[in-house]
Amino acid sequence: MAVSNLDKNTLYFTSSRAEASGNKNDAWYGEKFFDIFKSTLDNNGKWSIPTPISDVINTDASEGAMTFDAKGNVMYFTRCKKSDVKGQEGQCKIYKSTYDSSKWSEGELLPFNSDSYTCGQPTLSEDGTTMYFASDMPGGLGGKDIWMIKNENGTWGTPVNVSSINTAGDEMFPYLAPNGKLYFSSNGHPGMGGLDIFTATMENGSWGQVTNLKYPINSSYDDFGLMFNTATTGYLTSSRSGGQGADDIYSFVVPPANFAVYGRVYDTDTQEPIAGATVELFGSDGTQLSVKTQDSGTYRYQLKPEVDYKISASFTGYLTQFKEVSTKGLDESKDFEKNFDFPLKSTAKPIALPEIFYDLDKYSLRPESKTALDGLIKVLDDNPTITIKLTAHTDFRADDNYNLKLSNNRALAAYNYLVSKGVDKARLSWEGRGEKDPKEVENDQNYPPFKRGDVLSEQFINNLPTDELKEKAHQYNRRTEFRVLSTDYVPKTKK
């Protein structure tokens, strides 16, 4: 089956009905040889009486399994020669025909066909440069496989086996859908019985993620030839019970997918929910929405398909945070909940930068420290009106003057890194505090095994039972923090 862009309401299909050409039956199917027919759906939802497509296309052989180019005036179709031996399938080949004004041209045999094997059931990419088809040519994995061939400058290349989706069974009826996925039928992948319809997704230049479409698309009978005529409607062929003949055409509707994102906004240190926080959503389609969190700090948004979103959470006295989510390329309903909580940092007290630690007696930045500072740059980007002060701290080993000088160098190293990454100097200041301000633990999770309220002073550390715990406490003291100084900075206009 196929729909041409010349007329989206006209369905082209294969049939062995009485009106088909010829007066003999095919030995393989025991029916008349197949022809290509067409039928048009009118505004009242009624299909016209099917008529043969063309006398020059339909012959006393079998024709069917066609595809059209993007304009709709070039058709590639399958023609299978007669089989006079009962139970033996006729040899099939792929032909090309062009529509000119009012008629189709005679079929032109494509060069990669052979008398030694069967080729058929073509599907064409939108740009017309890639064709997939079914064949039992040598080099396959067994039975009929799906093959791919490229057309460069009007010349067809060498067929390539799509081995990532083929099996020792039969893979047939490929269809490149407008959504970028490849649909095909197989009796080699696990299914419900007979031929089932599967979908595959292109990943890193290879088809993968083979998925059975399951019921109601598939049944315990043969199901094949799926195609879409709109983004949410299409047709397939099936021999399932309840039809009018051997293989019948069925229509289907894809129910709209539902998407939602939800989460919780809370204080990073206390873990308490932040009620009344503003959660805003910005969509690539121009959507702008804003909600306030509930007493539990929760929020929820319904999302549209095929849209990229940015979500922000903000509250007075806290740093704003952004997250991203996208529904592009998703066919099935999905709730986004994991990783969409917003732990917000209060600006009322210094904020420790994770992984901004230093080796003993050193002030050079470790690689992980640069990664953490990159995270601070994102905080500054997300909060473009804040200015901050970087403060570096040491442990209490060595004398006060030495530690103060070392902490100044550490703070300056962080400052210089931010400036080198394009942060405006007007938004930054720095200070070394030496050993003056031992770390006070605000969050048990971030500073194990110490508890909230522990102050990692010299006396506290000296009383720890093991050298390992003492060294961990010293490491937590060798830190860099930042404090928000103002929230009224006016970003410079970029020239």
Image (tube, grey):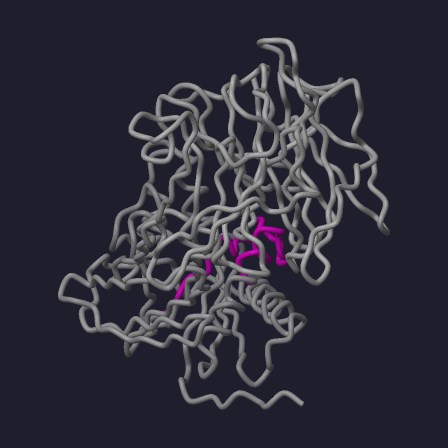
Q: Is residue 363 placed above or below 169 in the rendered structure?
A: below
Q: Position of residue 15 (x, y in %)?
A: 51, 34
Q: Position of residue 263 (x, y in %)?
A: 27, 57
Q: Is residue 117 placed above or below 58 in the rendered structure?
A: above
**466 to the left or right of 69:** left
Residue furthest to the front in view is 23
**73 to the left or right of 458:** right
Q: Is residue 44 placed above or below 93 in the rendered structure?
A: below
Q: Position of residue 40 (x, y in %)?
A: 46, 55
- Taking the spot 42% from the left edge, 73% from the top edge, the residue there is 483
- 370 magenta-colored: yes
Q: Nearer the viewer, residue 321 or 416?
A: 321
- Taking the spot 35% from the left edge, 26% from the top edge, the residue there is 240
Question: Which portion, as a residue range, is magenta?
Answer: 350-373
Residue 114, quarter of the rendered image:
top right
Count the labels in the image: 0
Q: Nearer the viewer, residue 210 or 346?
A: 210
**178 to the left or right of 322:** right
**271 to the left or right of 171:** left
Residue 395 visible at all? no
Residue furthest to the top in view is 86
Q: Nearer the viewer, residue 65 or 207?
A: 65
Residue 291, quarter of the rendered image:
bottom left
Q: Nearer the viewer, residue 477 or 128?
A: 128
- 472 magenta-colored: no
